[in-house]
Image (cartoon, helix red, strand yellow):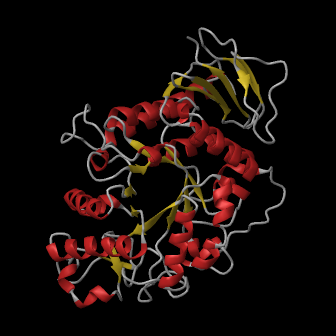
Amino acid sequence: MNIIQQKLRRLLAATLMGWMVINSPVVSAQPSNSVARKSPDWLRSAVVYEIFPRDFSSEGNLNAITAKLDVLQDLGVNVLWLMPIHPVGEKMKKGSLGSPFSVQDFYAINPDYGTTNDFKQLVAEAHKRGMKVVMDIVAGQTSWDSVLMTHPDFYLHGTNGAIIPPDPAWTDVAGLNYANPDVRHYMIDMMKYWMNGYGVDGFRCDVAPNVPLDFWESARTELEQVNPQVIMFADAGNEPELLVKAFDVDSSWGMIGMMNKVMNSDIPADYIKDQWEHENQLFPQGALHLRFSDNHEETRAVARYGIKGALAAQVFMLTLDGVPLFYNGMEVGDATESADPALFEKMPVFWQCGGRPPLRDIYRDLIKLRKQYPAFYNGQLSWLENTAPAQIITIMRQDAKDQFLVLINLSSTRVTGSFKLPDATGFEPVKISDNPAPIDVNPPDFDLGGYGWCIYHRSTPD
């Protein structure tokens, strides 16, 4: 790449970051020195696994998930996030099966998924293995043939008096009206039902900003009376106030958006650091973010980045601060479609992917490393300058006992160089399956092939 091209890329990146700052929400209600709610200590070291029950197996039911709990436990997963398990609306549905986010009855189980007893067994078996179970709740909407349609006052109405979607593009759902206190009571009672009757540990709340903040705060207070350790995930980005009282963690949409642009060679890798710093300034102190490279709303990471790129991106998410997420077969490199149109059809995970590195072994080793060393989930994160900022990310995770250097090449070409660290002696490469240590290269120097990465460790100097 010549100098003119490099300058053009830097200009584009600067413009993008400026747009992000201008378009971030004004957080006047929460000053920059606000503090995030105190979440359970175990959540910081947790690994979340998102499951789309329809596509997780060829059977597409809850029992097939229960049958794979040992495999997920072996991977290192300790939180299961189940996408909505309720009956799907037929009226105005999209695709042949409809979206799981178009709910007919919040109190029922999708008959294609099984029975209430099947769900009880899934939760009980997960708990036996030390796993938490988080249900996906779509609090802002229902299907057009929902059981709640007998209460038209539960819904949003347009100027002509007709019920309307929460978003004009979401034609398969109808928006709920939280100005009606009966809606609030109904939704809180419904969440209590799943906690009391089934032992659910928490909720992932779809498009949380579409529901008033004071509802979530009230719901949290009431749910804690059922289970003081309830956990709540907000499907939101750039909404700092959600993490002050109501939610434990949100979705880091800004980070994955920046990663997509870096991996597409639109901007240099060091703008990921700028995104991280932007989030730290915007959010309350101690805020937790769900860190993901793949989920049900994105094209599969292996399709966006290639196999090696997808691995490099997930290595970053596993070593970054926050709570890492895996999605529905990504540990085998599944490339089955996700998002639109896959949300509306049956597209099961292909578990026997060929031509892949041993991704499950690699991810298992990385998860084990992360859980073994608190430096990754309670320690400090520092960004180290390097001589190839357009391609290479260099970070340090450390606490009073351990220091880890993480070097990741987010480009497809080999890159050599060095990073700045006053004292780089004593670092030894961490052994990870199928990732040999660099030969004849020691920190602060690096030599990384396309999408290559390496982790080094030393005890924290006195």
Instruction: Answer yes or no: is residue 345 visible.
Output: yes
Q: Quadrant of the N terminus?
A: top right
State which quadrant residue 160 falls in.
bottom left
Residue at 69%, 62% in the rendered image = 71
The relative height of residue 105 versus residue 225 in the rendered view (above or below) is: below
Is 222 situated left or right of 137 in this image?
left
Residue at 24%, 91% in the rendered image = 150
Q: In the image, residue 390 lies at what x, y percent?
A: 61, 28
Is 91 situated left or right of 354 in this image?
left
Residue extending farthest to the top is 422
Instruction: Answer yes or no: is residue 264 visible.
Output: no
Residue at 66%, 32% in the rendered image = 408
Residue at 46%, 73% in the rendered image = 84
Q: In the image, residue 175 lies at what x, y percent?
A: 29, 74
Residue extending farthest to the front is 128
Q: In the image, residue 398 lies at what x, y percent?
A: 54, 25
The relative height of residue 93 versus residue 220 in the rendered view (above or below) is: below
Q: In the image, residue 302 lies at what x, y percent?
A: 69, 54
Q: Quadrant of the C terminus?
A: top right
Is 225 situated left or right of 308 in this image?
left
Q: What is the tally of numbered marks visible in this picture?
A: 0
Q: Nearer the viewer, residue 152 or 457?
A: 457
